[in-house]
Image (tube, rainbow, N blue to C red):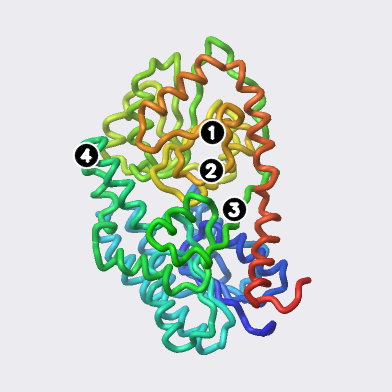
Amino acid sequence: MKNREVVVAHPGKQHVFQLLIALKKANVPFRFFTTVYDKESSLTNILKRFLKGKDFKKASSRRCEQVDDSQVSLIGEFGGLLLILLAKIGVSKSIRDYFYLVIHKRFATKVAKYAIKNNSPAVILFDSNVYDSFLLIKSNRPDIKCILDVTIASRSYMKTIYERDMQITNSKEIYEEQRHLWNERKMERYENEFLLADHLLVGSSFVKNSILANCLECEDKIRMIPYGVDTSQFHQRESLPRKQEPLKLFFVGGINRRKGVHHLLEVVSLYDSDQVALTLAGGFDAKSDLYEKYKEYPNIHFEGFVTRDVMSEYYKKSDVFVLPSLAEGLALVGLEALASGLPVICTQNSGVNDLIIDGQNGFVIKSSSTDDLRGRIDWFLDNKERLNYMSQNARNSISDYDWKDYHYKIAHFLKDIGCIVHES
């Protein structure tokens, strides 16, 4: 078994590179499949030569330096690049979703066929649209272990959360953003991924509980392995705000309702600019109602996409990190904020709440609660002298959330399920 390749496949990026590093450290042979990757002779590598600035940096980030290019195979690279282009030029989400399903179904099927043909001991795929892959494998080679890395809460659980948010806000905008969750056929496929999988990897208790809410029989399949953060890339804030300075809030992520940004913007807009200032780093649609409504507020600053190499500077200039998400997995930006010494205000649905102790390194609030959010911002306004103490606690709280710990736990998981014959 030790000479057979474990198949890892992800059409995007997320934390998959850290998973590959874990396999390499454990001397596990693997083959990584993806759509867009910056390897020699790839279309991505060729196009990168014509890019500049942020686009160049984003393209260059689609590779893992610790992994040899010979271990990486591309499937549907043109389609993957097409999806990026469609999003960049603002093509409607319904059109993008159509291409996404077609491209990813083909991707999943090819990955499964490779695993079957090459007698792989296991496949590690990431949630969303891997149903076809698992079904094909289980129909032909039930001995191949199907491992599902669950990066976000169960879709059916998220749907319940969104329906509650729509009632609270008296708005159906989130339905337009997440329309696929109301497609019964798609939802059935999502839920069957859990049933077909032999093992489920989750990063937080929120994700685990979201699965168990609708699949109690999945409990024995779940292994919780939190993600990590490279603390060397993030450094403690240098100075605290003076009494007369506004409280500087920072948010990182897509400007959409799943991230709870609509609640954050509503609350911050109630403050004067000399009280609270909010910086949002993340891609947004300039035609979206959220941007149009709040772009002129003097204390709200939309920075757009910020590259990884400068993100640490944004953390250092902030006082409090805010993560009002309606649903996450384990938000890596929350770990980065803590590593930067930022107290965190997050919802109980962020995954980061596993690390937060109220009043010590931040606060956990209810999702969709503008009252809770404003109450905690007010607390920081009234207790600026506590920021230094909470900043140190924030940095200390990620001591057990290092990527080295993640690598170690992944190796032990693979050993437990028989994918590692011996460790290095």
Task: Name which residue lies at 31% across and 71% down.
Answer: 102
Q: Earlier in the sequence, mark 3 or mark 1?
A: 3
Q: Earlier in the sequence, mark 4 or mark 2?
A: 4
Can you identify the residue that label 4 sits on?
A: 171
The image position of residue 412, as x and y in percent, is 68, 66
Indicate the quadrant where residue 254 lies.
top left
Secondary structure, mark 1, is strand
Establish if 211 lies above or below 380. Answer: below
Question: Which numbered circle lies on residue 344?
Answer: 1
Secondary structure, mark 3, is loop
Question: Which numbered circle lies on residue 352?
Answer: 2
Residue 53 vs residue 271: left or right?
right
Q: Earlier in the sequence, mark 4 or mark 1?
A: 4
Q: Quadrant of the C terminus?
A: bottom right
Q: Tell me the kind of residue under disc 4.
A: Ser
Secondary structure, mark 4, is loop
State how far apart marks 3 and 4 are (Cα): 34 Å
- Classed neighbour count for the residue bearing mark 1: other residues with Cα under 10 Å, few (<14), some (14–19), many (≥20): many
State how far apart marks 4 and 2 are (Cα): 27 Å
Question: Which numbered circle lies on residue 227?
Answer: 3
Q: Tell me the kind of residue under disc 1.
A: Val
Q: Tell me the kind of residue under disc 2.
A: Val
